[in-house]
Image (cartoon, rainbow, N blue to C red):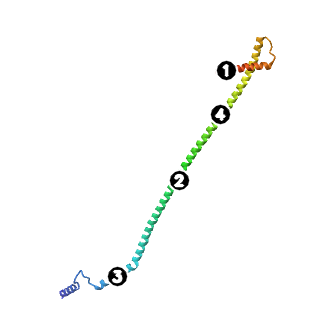
Amino acid sequence: MAGSHLTAVLLAAEKEQKNPLWPINWAEVILVLIVFLAVLFIIWKFVTPKFEETFAQRRDAIEGGIARAEAAQLEAQATLTQYQQQLADARGEAAQIRENARAEAQRIVEELRAQAQEESARIVARGEEQLANQRAGVVRELRGEIGSIAVELSEKIVGQTLADDAQVRATVDAFLADLEGRDGVNA
């Protein structure tokens, strides 16, 4: 009997196991399906909107960052353009200042040259004037000495004293004028 009992159990087990690929318990299948649908509903209702919101915020942050970067780049470009314009203006102004300085230096050099020439001409004129005064003084002295020597020689030649100074002076002056006229002809 023991052998028949084992056979009956095996037959009963064979009846319960019809197909190993088909689920055995429909209650488990329905329970798993209900739990799966509940989890799917919770994910769809609560989790997915949070993910969508987070993704939207990230997308907005990234797009806003890109927009801000583009705006910053445009502002930097405008600033660079303005800086280059200011630099060009400064260079032009520096060139103008250098040109003005050169012109001013040239003007100062010309003024100093003109002043030096005026001073030189004034010094030369003063020297010529002093030379003419000295020459006139020497000529007066020489006339006086020549007149005295001529009177002395005349007195020695004539053998008498010439007493009239005005007449002597007129004779000496005529003699000297005659000599100067001859020097002018010879020169």
Question: From the image, which quarter does the N terminus lie in?
Answer: bottom left
Type of amino acid at the residue the image marks with label 4: Ala
Name the front one of labels 2 and 3: 2
Q: Which residue is mark 1?
A: 183
- How far across and down, in percent of the image, does residue 13 sit? 22, 85
Q: Which residue is mark 3?
A: 37
Q: Which residue is mark 2?
A: 89
Tell me, yes or no, whether the two marked residues, 1 and 3, touch with CB atoms within 8 Å.
no
Name the front one of labels 1 and 3: 1
Q: State the separation of the CA atoms marked 4 and 1.
A: 30 Å
Tell me, yes or no, whether the two marked residues, 4 and 3, touch with CB atoms within 8 Å.
no
Question: From the image, which quarter does the C terminus lie in?
Answer: top right
- The front one of 42 and 171 is 171
Q: State the separation of the CA atoms marked 2 and 3.
A: 75 Å
Name the front one of labels 1 and 2: 1
Residue positioned 33% across, 83% down in the render: 34
Check disc 2 and report its element: helix, strand or loop.
helix
Type of amino acid at the residue the image marks with label 1: Asp
Q: State the separation of the CA atoms marked 4 and 3.
A: 121 Å
Q: Which residue is mark 4?
A: 121
